[in-house]
């Protein structure tokens, strides 16, 4: 080896590598083009006006299909919002069961109901027969895990002569017609169940639109079903895009890429023209649940102190920018019957013991407003003398700790009508000793008695009245502080009409929706 | 010994296979490591509203055969993989292979676009140095513009939000949503490529003056080679040092572009793996990770190949010069200016209350009362930036320092650290955090550990690349010939040469570390609201980026100032060392530098001799 100074310098002396530059460039260009060639773009689902009349609707939905459009999970709501599936019944504006595929029904005895079907056809051309309906209900009842509306219900269905179907439950069930209104109990043709482990609602349902094509979890293409029993839909089809990000969904509407954008987040509402915003009060209530079993809030006096410290109107106006109503009770203004039947809670404890008490408030960030609500609560509670620590996580990582009582308080947004459409089921599930989602860990005899009494009533109006009494009993314990009742904001393009704004969030596109 | 550095042999392959195996096992054991019931997370991913009744959980357990235990599940999955079947998603029940391949294709395309933008950006960043360098006017000038430093510290989601809102929605020039054709690629590629390109450009710009100062450049000039040719060769001389980092960037973007995929609604691999990690959808997570790790292996192989094509023979023969600036950059007043600005803002903010809410004064624009405006809950943004400074900086600096130490130490052992660096870099950040949580528990130090576990990789890759070149330098051969032992070489020659650029690199990545720490919040790790930690400020104000840009711009500007301080002060982060003769290279041609060189004539003498020798 010579001295360093006399070594030849490589970049200039290695001449033979110079001509390879273009070759290399071609190679890189080839690399860049390969993915292009293999078709790495999502297929657009580009719309075209149909010759048969009516143009196609473009809809941006918030939740992509999680289970490949299985009708027994969360995708059920999606199918029903797009007008694909229907059940025997549906919910009307007053929260009562109304006719859908069943024209009428009657209660034969404690455990058995008789439903009379209307004349209808499945999207695959077959008739809706009692036998097919009974088979659909049986499949729904046997689904694993159980479809939410039928959880804990043992149900058998059979054709009962004529156009009638007999549905029998093993225990008396006064709200069966309400249950059957759930999107999780759709009526599908035999073809849907052909495969052993998956139910396919593609072209097998009864609604005004049928799914014709699905691209992964990004796009679903729907065509009008011309033989729909309720008349031909005005739009010739629907192109549904699933856009999980709220800002992106709103931008889709603003750039005219979509006609309807569901669930516009509060933070983006102001960026839409007022004419493009439709607000619907929903059955979703955000509340603060206080841990009644352990920690500071075991003492009802401290719970009362927390309740008194909270100003719900500043939450509705401040955090939700007015797109929410201040908490009135467990049931919000979306339930039109609730306000008239509300009972004032009694037997509340006197507030005391807030000073210097340290508490942990937990919430989740899957709904972006909740961490903001928690931070406002923190300030309000600290003004009353509490020392507050916040815990914000992704929901699935929070729930088991919350149910185990590891936090003193939990901010939660909950759909109070669940899937059953029955107001009593949320009370039973969330606030009784045996409740499966009892975040406040409440176990109170008065509450349990009031709830079980409400649960035994068949008449819709009376049942609602009893539910309000049970609500008062729950609120009397101060285990729950209702914070706000959310309104859902739907972005609707200027030339679109007939969007179905449903407080139960079960429908969106229907026969009369068009642009 | 030098040659073995270049070639990866069977042991390296084996080591890589062991790492991939360990990673897949880690993913397979994830729920059992983190003690999170997969039945619950799967149930919640399928339907957030569903109550976790014991019956529902039991149904999922039996459906997924979870009771068989992690090892059986993993074995079954691996067995299927050998037959080309990556299983079915636990959430949707759909086949994993097509969905992962589709997402991978989308992500690769997005990454290719981002890479193109990054290369152009890096070119723009270095253009000034190349132009000056090829005309022998480089020495004595302060190191490049700080604009690129600002750009490199901007978080990609912020650029994405701004581009989507301004170019996509308000101007309507380009589609802001979806993934349906080439014009949909522009905005996402810009969001990803601009900051990454600025970072790579800064690193390149850092090395170029050294290349222009090498003897061959001198010879080329003497021979009359035009400036353009010299600039091209200087690039060729420096790019190999960056190739490993470019490879890491390519792989990191393929699996980690979650925020940009979300803003532009792109069905890429980042979102797929994030969702799978959160829901513990193990088959999808395993398949996604495998794809990324394979991609990482390919990318690092290509990077090594490209480096060999560019400077291979010189590496083999140990015929490189050391890449150093001809003269240390002059101390500049800029870092003081930027640092002063930052300190001033922080000091002003410290005087205010960072948690006082006023929901009636939300999203107010900057005014005398609130110089930086207010955020979505009516809190003073200046106060939050000021109070968040200490938490953010202390932790980010500590993590960066740890990553630097680990990176340099491991970077010194390239054959050992190369495969783990690739692998760690390929793992989606959330998955890395989950794995670290599984091993270390969710203590206070977990977020720092999780970020350090990933952040060392680019620094190690950089160290290795520089070391490889440094070991092939002629002066090292000379020192060795004079009888220097390996320790002496390491301490007196290698480390002093490699450390300064790597330290500057670590400083450039400091803002990224702060953001990564904040990004773990949703797993219940790290800073929790209402803490005014800067990363948290950025993410909590992102939804309001269009309505209240000041609320995101303030913390982003603070991070950018930090980056600018790091870059401009970089010249000062040199370790003291003995003057070495070869350092003053091309400065001989510098008229304005003559005076300085007269004083150091004893340094110049041998080099002048060498260039004479080459010319003759």
Image (cartoon, coloured by chain):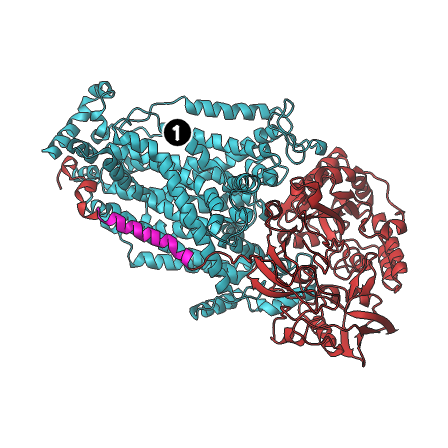
Chain colours: A red, B cyan
Note whether B218 is above or below A59 in the view shown: above
How dense is the environment of label 1, judged by Cα within 10 Å: few (below 14), some, or many (20 and up)?
A: some
Subunit that carries the residue with mark 1: B
Nearer the observer, A299 or B54: B54
Please tell me whether residue B230 belongs to the stretch shown in magenta: no
In the rendered image, the quadrant that contains the N terminus of chain A is top left
Nearer the observer, B90 or A223: A223
Note whether A67 is above or below B536 in the view shown: below
> Magenta segment range?
A18-37
Q: Position of residue B393 (x, y in %)?
A: 51, 33
Nearer the observer, B312 or A221: A221
Q: Is residue B457 visible?
A: no
Q: Is residue A309 visible?
A: yes
Instruction: Give the residue displayed 64% in from the left and 49% down from the top.
Output: A366
Q: Position of residue A80 (x, y in %)?
A: 70, 62
Nearer the observer, A182 or A57: A57
Q: Circle 1 sits on which residue?
A: B145
Please tell me whether residue A21 belongs to the stretch shown in magenta: yes
Q: Is residue B567 left or right of residue A431?
A: left
Q: Quadrant of residue B66?
A: bottom right
Q: Quadrant of residue A74?
A: bottom right
Q: Position of residue A33 (x, y in %)?
A: 38, 54
Q: Is residue B34 left or right of residue B575?
A: right
Note whether B494 is above or below B61 in the view shown: above
The prevailing secondary structure element of the residues shown in magenta is helix
Q: Position of residue B466 (x, y in %)?
A: 30, 41
Note whether A103 is above or below B534 in the view shown: below
Residue extending farthest left: B616
């Amino acid at each position: 080896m010579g001295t360093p100074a006399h070594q030849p310098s490589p970049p200039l002396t290695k001449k033979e590598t110079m001509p390879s530059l273009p070759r290399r460039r071609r190679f890189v260009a080839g690399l860049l083009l390969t993915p292009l060639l293999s078709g790495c773009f999502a297929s657009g689902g580009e719309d075209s006006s149909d010759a048969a009349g009516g143009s196609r609707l473009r809809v941006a939905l918030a939740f992509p299909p999680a289970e490949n459009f299985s009708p027994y999970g969360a995708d059920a709501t999606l199918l029903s919002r797009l007008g694909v599936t229907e059940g025997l019944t549906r919910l009307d504006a007053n929260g009562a069961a109304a006719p859908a595929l069943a024209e009428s029904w009657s209660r034969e005895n404690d455990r058995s109901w008789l439903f009379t079907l209307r004349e209808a056809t499945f999207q695959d051309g077959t008739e809706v027969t009692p036998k097919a309906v009974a088979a659909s209900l049986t499949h729904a009842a046997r689904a694993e895990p159980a479809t939410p509306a039928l959880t804990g219900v043992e149900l058998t269905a059979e054709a009962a002569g004529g156009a009638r179907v007999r549905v029998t439950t093993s225990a008396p069930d006064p709200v069966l017609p309400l249950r059957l209104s759930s999107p999780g109990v759709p009526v599908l043709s035999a073809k849907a169940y052909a495969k052993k482990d998956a139910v396919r609602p593609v072209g097998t349902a009864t609604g005004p639109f049928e799914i014709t094509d699905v691209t992964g979890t990004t796009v679903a293409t729907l065509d009008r079903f011309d033989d729909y029993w309720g008349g031909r839909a005005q739009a010739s089809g629907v192109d549904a895009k699933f856009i999980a990000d709220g800002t992106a969904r709103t931008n889709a509407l603003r750039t005219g890429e979509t006609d309807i954008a569901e669930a516009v987040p509060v933070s983006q509402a102001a960026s839409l023209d007022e004419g493009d915003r439709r607000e619907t009060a929903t059955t979703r209530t955000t509340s603060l649940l206080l841990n009644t079993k352990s920690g500071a809030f075991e003492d009802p006096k401290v719970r009362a102190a927390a309740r008194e410290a909270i100003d719900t109107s500043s939450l509705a106006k401040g955090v939700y920018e007015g797109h929410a109503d201040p908490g009135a009770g467990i049931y919000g203004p979306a339930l039109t019957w609730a306000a008239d039947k509300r009972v004032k809670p009694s037997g509340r404890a006197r507030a005391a013991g807030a000073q210097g008490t340290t508490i942990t408030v937990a919430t989740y960030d899957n709904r972006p407003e909740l961490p903001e609500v928690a931070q406002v609560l923190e300030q309000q509670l600290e003004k009353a003398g509490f020392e507050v620590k916040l815990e914000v996580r992704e929901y699935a990582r929070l729930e088991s700790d919350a149910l185990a009582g590891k936090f003193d308080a939990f901010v939660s947004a909950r759909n109070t009508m669940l899937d059953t459409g029955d107001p009593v089921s949320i009370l039973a599930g969330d606030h009784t000793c045996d409740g499966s989602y009892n975040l406040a860990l409440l176990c109170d005899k008065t509450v349990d008695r009031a709830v079980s009494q409400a649960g035994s009533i068949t008449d819709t109006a009376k049942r609602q009245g009893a539910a309000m009494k049970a609500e008062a009993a729950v609120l009397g314990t101060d285990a729950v502080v209702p914070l706000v009742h959310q309104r859902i904001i739907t972005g609707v393009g200027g030339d679109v009409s007939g969007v179905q704004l449903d407080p139960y969030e079960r429908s969106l596109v229907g026969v009369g929706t068009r642009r | 010994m030098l040659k073995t550095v270049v070639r990866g042999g069977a042991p390296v392959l084996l080591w890589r296979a062991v790492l991939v195996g360990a990673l897949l096992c880690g993913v397979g054991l994830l729920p059992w490591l983190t003690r999170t019931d997969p039945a619950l997370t799967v149930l919640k991913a399928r339907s957030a509203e569903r109550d976790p009744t014991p019956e529902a959980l039991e149904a999922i357990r039996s459906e997924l055969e979870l009771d068989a235990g992690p090892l059986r599940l993993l074995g079954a999955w691996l067995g299927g993989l050998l037959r080309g079947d990556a299983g079915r998603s636990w959430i949707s029940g759909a086949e994993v292979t097509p969905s992962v391949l589709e997402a991978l294709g989308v992500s690769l395309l997005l990454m290719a676009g981002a890479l193109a933008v990054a290369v152009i950006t890096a070119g723009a960043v270095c253009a000034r140095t190349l132009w000056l360098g090829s005309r022998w006017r480089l020495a004595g000038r302060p190191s490049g513009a700080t604009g690129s430093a600002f750009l490199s510290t901007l978080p990609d989601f912020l650029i994405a939000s701004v581009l989507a809102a301004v170019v996509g929605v308000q101007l309507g020039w380009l589609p802001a949503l979806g993934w349906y054709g080439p014009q949909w690629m522009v905005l996402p590629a810009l969001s990803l490529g601009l900051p990454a390109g600025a970072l790579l450009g800064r690193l390149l710009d850092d090395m170029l003056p050294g290349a222009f100062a090498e003897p061959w450049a001198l010879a080329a000039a003497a021979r009359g080679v035009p400036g353009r040719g010299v600039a091209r060769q200087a690039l060729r001389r420096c790019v190999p040092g960056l190739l490993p980092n470019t490879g890491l960037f390519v792989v990191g973007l393929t699996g980690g572009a979650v925020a940009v995929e979300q803003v532009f609604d792109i069905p890429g691999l980042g979102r797929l793996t994030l969702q799978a990690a959160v829901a513990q959808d193990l088959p999808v997570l395993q398949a996604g990770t495998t794809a990324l790790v394979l991609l990482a292996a390919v990318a690092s192989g290509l990077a090594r190949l490209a480096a060999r094509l560019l400077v291979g023979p010189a590496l083999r023969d140990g015929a490189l010069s050391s890449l150093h600036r001809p003269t240390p950059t002059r101390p500049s007043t800029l870092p003081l200016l930027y640092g002063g600005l930052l300190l001033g803002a922080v000091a002003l903010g410290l005087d205010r209350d960072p948690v006082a809410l006023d929901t009636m004064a939300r999203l107010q624009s900057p005014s005398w009362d609130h110089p930086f405006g207010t955020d979505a809950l009516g809190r003073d943004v200046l106060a939050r930036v000021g109070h968040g400074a200490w938490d953010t900086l202390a932790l980010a600096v500590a993590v960066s320092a740890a990553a630097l130490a680990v990176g340099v130490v491991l970077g010194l052992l390239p054959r050992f650290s190369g495969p783990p660096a690739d692998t760690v870099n390929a793992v989606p950040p959330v998955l890395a955090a989950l794995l670290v949580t599984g091993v270390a528990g969710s203590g206070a130090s977990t977020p720092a550990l999780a970020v350090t576990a990933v952040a060392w990789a680019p620094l190690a890759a950089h160290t290795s690349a520089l070391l490889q070149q440094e070991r092939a330098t002629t002066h090292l051969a000379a020192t060795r010939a004079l009888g220097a032992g390996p320790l002496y070489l390491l301490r007196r020659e290698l480390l002093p040469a490699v450390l300064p650029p790597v330290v500057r690199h670590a400083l450039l990545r400091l803002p990224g570390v702060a953001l990564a720490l904040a990004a773990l919040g949703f797993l219940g790790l790290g800073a929790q609201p209402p803490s005014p930690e800067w990363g948290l400020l950025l993410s909590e104000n992102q939804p309001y980026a269009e309505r209240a840009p000041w609320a995101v711009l303030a913390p982003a500007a603070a991070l950018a100032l930090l980056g600018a301080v790091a870059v401009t002060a970089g010249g000062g982060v040199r370790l003291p060392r003995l003057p070495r003769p070869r350092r003053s290279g091309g400065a001989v041609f510098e008229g304005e530098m003559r005076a300085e060189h007269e004083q150091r004539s004893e340094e110049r003498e041998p080099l002048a001799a060498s260039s004479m020798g080459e010319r003759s």
